[in-house]
Image (cartoon, rainbow, N blue to C red):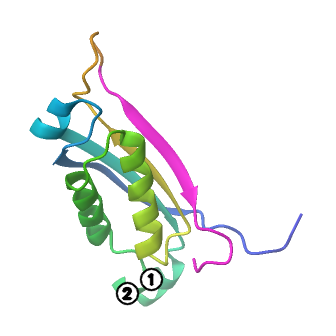
Amino acid sequence: MSTSAVAPRDRITLTGITATGHHGFFDHEKRDGQPFVVDVVLHTDIRPAAAADDLALTTDYGKAAELVRDRIEGGPHDLIETLTQGIADAILALFETVSAVDVTVHKPQAPIPVPFGDVSISIHREREAGTRA
């Protein structure tokens, strides 16, 4: 077993970030919009921030939530897969303290012709090797 750095095991979790987006394959989805709900898990190491009690040493989850909201309201995209990937990419680009991110985008009013509770896409993305984490 390697003695290289171990990936952080700490997580900051935001659930239920909700905004109206205009994403979808159909014209009426882009025109009318609908609610999207996003959950994110930020994989990080909170020890430096906890030791110093300093927000500058951790991931500002308020800013992360605003980023997610802005991505939902941006676009439009045909696929929620595109939205999901864009959120993950933006979080990893903005927050150097995040080594990996889990993103789930829920589309609770998707145009599906049968009764359903939710549709979601979930991904896990890690920072590229050689980039800061």
64 or 30: nearer the eye?
30
**Residue 132 versus residue 11 in the image, above or below:** below
Q: What stretch is highlighted in magenta?
A: 117-133
Q: Which residue is drawn at 19% across and 32% down?
A: 27
Residue 58 painted magenta? no
Q: For the residues labelled 2 and 1, say whether their Cβ atoms are less than 8 Å apart.
A: yes
From the image, tell me which residue sits under label 2.
56
Outermost residue, top side: 114
Image quadrant where residue 62 sits: bottom left
Structural crowding at the residue carrying mark 1, measured as other residues with C-alpha within 10 Å and reported as few (<14), some (14–19) or many (≥20): some
Q: Which amino acid does label 1 sit on?
A: Ala
Pinpoint residue 113: horizontal percent, then vertical percent.
Answer: 27, 11
Q: At numbered mark 1, what does the secondary structure look like: helix, strand or loop?
A: helix
Pinpoint residue 28: horizontal percent, then vertical percent.
Answer: 15, 31
**Residue 63 versus residue 78 in the image, above or below:** below
From the image, tell me which residue sits under label 1.
49
Q: What residue type is labelled 2?
A: Ala
**Residue 12 versus residue 22 in the image, above or below:** below
